[in-house]
Image (tube, rainbow, N blue to C red):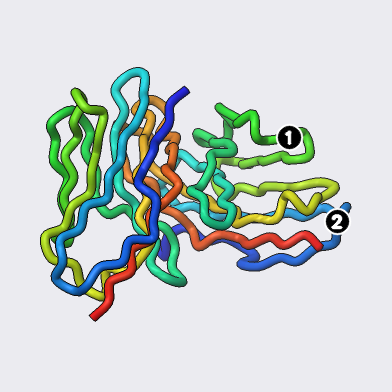
Amino acid sequence: DTGVSQDPRHKITKRGQNVTFRCDPISEHNRLYWYRQTLGQGPEFLTYFQNEAQLEKSRLLSDRFSAERPKGSFSTLEIQRTEQGDSAMYLCASSLKGISTEAFFGQGTRLTVV
Amino acid sequence: GNSVTQMEGPVTLSEEAFLTINCTYTATGYPSLFWYVQYPGEGLQLLLKATKADDKGSNKGFEATYRKETTSFHLEKGSVQVSDSAVYFCVYGSSNTGKLIFGQGTTLQVKP
């Protein structure tokens, strides 16, 4: 297994456009997380899935953001009507359910809204 | 709510110097604590972890002890190397959901 992969690595979009990011977790991992990281800050939790069920969403996640994990495998994060404030690194992580299991992170998708 | 506070950087040290990066947390329940590291151009990776009070996590010469009485998880290394230059994150982990709460990160630069 090559770890958590995210696509694309970079995305530049115009304000008001929709964007979609993909995350492929480590294959046997049943939990998948999305985080957002802005320059000079630590990652902030956005949402997580256990298998295909989305179990928690941060208050940071406005209604322009939606995430899915069909069939409990890969996940997509869509941002509609992008704003300049959405510019950030979007990180995906996966783990196995259990106490204190390690979360493995992807390299992230860097979004720039112009 | 739950939060993590770590010392601000950047921290600049000479090779072989002693490193301490302070971290304190506020929490409900019984979190796990982690240090994650981000080397230049690479993704986040786990450096060490501790799952309960008085546990000591260690890896690559780094250590941190989970102190419940002081709600701290300070990172230490006795002799840093240039290759340790990176951003270090103190992280609180929910035992129920695995959700992670990150500190703001501390940039370490080690000079030869």
**Residue type for callout 2:** Arg
Q: Earlier in the sequence, mark 1 or mark 2?
A: 2
Residue B84 in the figure: left or right of residue B62: right
- Which type of secondary structure does the marked residue at label 1 adopt? loop
**Total residue callouts:** 2
Front position in the image: B71 or A15: B71
Counting other residues with Cα less than 10 Å from the Cα at mark 1, is it few (<14), some (14-19), or many (20 or more)? few
Position of residue A66 measured from the top left corner of the image (x, y, whole percent)? 72, 39
Of the 4 image quadrants, the one containing the N terminus of chain A is: bottom left
Q: Which mark is residue A80?
A: none
Position of residue A25 measured from the top left corner of the image (x, y, whole percent)? 49, 52
Quickly name the residue at label 1.
Answer: A62
**Residue type for callout 1:** Ser
Of the 4 image quadrants, the one containing the C terminus of chain A is: bottom right
**Residue A13 location, quadrant:** bottom right
Position of residue B62 measured from the top left corner of the image (x, y, whole percent)? 17, 56
Mark 1 on the same chain as mark 2: yes
Residue A11 in the figure: left or right of residue A47: right
Front position in the image: B111 or A36: B111
Quickly name the residue at label 2.
Answer: A15
**Residue at 55% across, 41% down:** A72
Residue B104 in the figure: left or right of residue A52: left
Front position in the image: A12 or A102: A12
**Tags 1 and 2 touching, CB below 8 Å:** no
**Residue at 17% across, 28% down:** B53
Position of residue A22 measured from the top left corner of the image (x, y, whole percent)? 63, 55
**Residue at 33% across, 45% down:** A102
| Tag 2 subunit | A
